[in-house]
Amino acid sequence: MAVFARRAEQTRLGGLGPARNSMDRAAYLLLSRLDQQGPTGVKALAAGMGIDSSTVTRQVAPLVDSGLVSRTADPEDGRAVVLQLSARGSARLEEVRTSRRRLVSALTADWTEEERDSFCTLLTRFNSAISRMQTQAGPEATVPASLSREPG
């Protein structure tokens, strides 16, 4: 798992073409979430991502400064903020996604369609299991002892 995590991080930074190494993980995750959810309040965005509101506020500031995200007052509660992916942010996100898709395609070029489908299915299932565990146990969740042992 450690090797997989390290390689996944290298792949994330990789991509192919001009978007290579051009967006950090926090920015990519925030832009992706805003793309999926549409205009979203800071608290809802933080909850959906499993992080603190202050973390979202800190991470979104450079995205607002660079014009990738717009920040407006919530029409129902002027004290709250609504974040929205800008047209520039949407275009930038698509550029990075395309770069990453090209890299994954290159890495799996010699895989069969069935192997790619199986990998996608199992990786999705794995990520869903992690999300369920975190949701059920909260942010302080620990891995059950039965799962934490190294295979021997």
Image (spheres, rainbow, N blue to C red):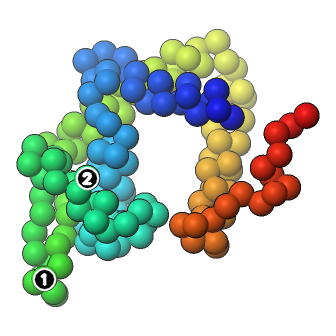
Q: Amino acid at mark 2?
A: Gln
Apparent side of residue 61 relative to residue 46 in the rendered image (left or right)? left
Determine which of the numbered discs, if any, sits on residue 20 in the image: none
The residue that disc 2 covers is: 59
Image height check: is 80 above or below 71? below
Q: Position of residue 15 (x, y in %)?
A: 39, 22
Q: Position of residue 119 (x, y in %)?
A: 68, 34
Image height check: is 29 above or below 93? below
Of residues 6 and 44, which is closer to you in this image? Answer: 6
- Viewport quadrant of the C terminus: top right
Q: Amino acid at mark 1?
A: Arg
The residue that disc 1 covers is: 79
Task: Tell which residue pokes out farthest to the right in this image.
Answer: 152
Query: Residue at left 19%, top 70%?
Result: 82
Within 10 Å of the Cα at label 2, are there few (<14), some (14-19), or many (20+) other Cα atoms? some
Gap between marks 1 and 2, in whole Å? 19 Å
Would you say the residues marked 1 and 2 are in contact, meaning their CB atoms lie under 8 Å apart? no
Apparent side of residue 85 relative to residue 97 in the rendered image (left or right)? left
Task: Tell which residue pokes out farthest to the bottom in this image.
Answer: 76
Quadrant in the rendering for residue 113: top right
Query: Residue at left 29%, top 45%?
Result: 27
Regarding residue 59, the answer to whether it shows in the image is yes
Compare marks 1 and 2 and give the one earlier in the sequence: 2
Regarding residue 94, the answer to whether it shows in the image is no
- Viewport quadrant of the N terminus: top right
Apparent side of residue 115 relative to residue 103 in the rendered image (left or right)? right
